[in-house]
Amino acid sequence: MPADTEVSPLRVLMRNAAQPGRVVWIGLRPGRRADMLAIEQTNITEDGLAGDRAKAGRRAVTLIQAEHLPAIGSYLGRGPVDPTLLRRNLVIEGINLLALRDRTITLGTATLLITGPCAPCSRMEETLGLGGYAAMRGHGGMTASVLTPGSVALGALVQRIGDA
């Protein structure tokens, strides 16, 4: 096999996930500064989650790992943070979202491209209290664009399907 078509051992390692993830929380931001609405299922359109204020593009859907909620809370001297305070659309458990950057995933019947980190905003200081912004740094989740609209419900699998 020619050298330019060989797959490096690191690239092979980066393709592997131990298991699929699962959607454990879904939330909508109906308007700027509006309270989050926790729901059990929704449609994902080209613009993002139906009823959410997000618009099509690289940040149409926001995701955060369930495993980060206790870490954020720990940095604030309390238990796991309520996802409604973080203003992300989906809480996913069981798969490393950062490892999915620039990768295509299925989520329910939708297909998303994980586009990059979702940095905390200054509002985290307001909603989480003193140090909220700092507690979220490195734990703010990921953003995604919608490749194929579909539906998602609590318990839906999250799986990597290939390179972007």
Image: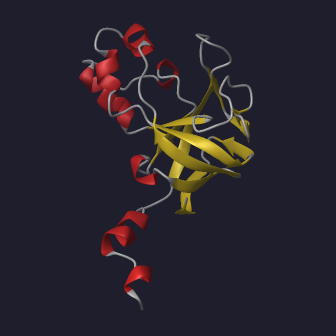
Is 73 positioned to the left or the right of 121 in the image? left
* Residue 41 shows up from this direction: yes
Left or right of residue 153, residue 19 in this image? left
Name the side, left or right, on which 46 lies relative to 121.
Answer: right
Check the image and report above or below for 133 versus 44.
above
Instruction: Let me know if residue 79 appears in the view.
Output: no
Residue lying at 57% horizontally and 56% vertically, measured from the top left? 104
Q: Which residue is drawn at 60% across and 36% down?
A: 61
Residue 81 locus on image (x, y percent): 40, 23
Residue at the far bottom in the pictured view: 1
Residue at figure coordinates x 61%, y 43% from the top left: 145
Colouring style = secondary structure
Q: Residue 123: where, in percent of width, then height?
A: 44, 12
The quadrant the C terminus occupies is: bottom right
3 left or right of 50 in image = left
Vertical arrangement, residue 44 with respect to residue 2, above or below: above
Quarter of the image containing the N terminus?
A: bottom left
Residue 132 in the image, given as x and y percentages of width and height: 33, 16
The percent position of residue 86, horizontal first and vertical second, equals 47, 22
- Image quadrant of residue 38? top right
* Number of numbered markers: 0
Task: Tell me which corner region of the image, top left, top right, bottom left or bottom right, holds residue 68.
Answer: top left
